[in-house]
Image (cartoon, rainbow, N blue to C red):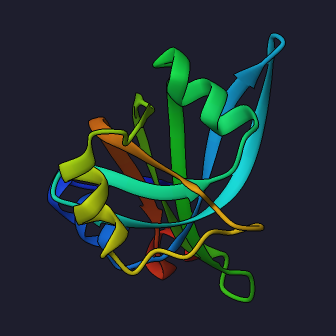
Amino acid sequence: MTLKALAERECLELLASRVVGRVAVVVDGQARVFPVNYLVDGSDIIFRTDEGAKLDAASAGAGVTFDIDDSDPLYHTGWSVMVTGRLEEVTQPHDLQRVRGLPVRAWGRNGRHWVRMPIAAVSGRRIDRAAAAT
């Protein structure tokens, strides 16, 4: 089975086409993966969260990985996009006012805190029907 690397532009288009992704952070030396509702705002990924691992990672400026994907189990096709960057809490009043107007709902309870992840690097891959058949 052959995987095709996706161009950065296609990765960004796929990233902007979805609203649910997963953010991976390291907690006590172990990777933890959390689903989030998000949107792409310029070159940032924006999501909301409450206190916990994601907000702790943002407070520490931790490097994280963000992932989205899609698959067709019948045809064994699909794609994935992975983004790396550092989380940061949105705290400046003018930034908060702007992001609060964005259509992002929290995955969990209230999502009182806004977090952004400036995209440092993005990569992706796709396996299509032709590659899956060979």
Q: Quadrant of residue 81?
A: bottom left
Residue 57 locus on image (x, y percent): 60, 26
- Residue at 35%, 79% in the rendered image: 17
Residue 6 position within the rendered picture, expressed as x and y whole percent measured from the top left: 29, 56
**Residue drawn where x is 78% and y is 35% of the image:** 32
In front of the other: 120 or 8: 120
Q: Nearer the viewer, residue 63 or 109?
A: 109
Residue 1 in sight here: no
Query: Which of the two residues, 100 or 105, is positioned nearer the viewer here?
Result: 100
Q: Residue 4's image quarter?
A: bottom left
- Left or right, residue 107 beside residue 60: right
**Furthest-front residue in this view:** 93
Q: Is residue 27 left or right of residue 71?
A: right
Question: Which residue occupies 15% across, 59% down?
Answer: 9
* Residue 20 in the image: above or below residue 68: below
Name the spot of residue 54 as percent of width and height, x first: 65, 37
Q: Residue furthest top?
A: 29
Q: Position of residue 98 (x, y in %)?
A: 22, 64
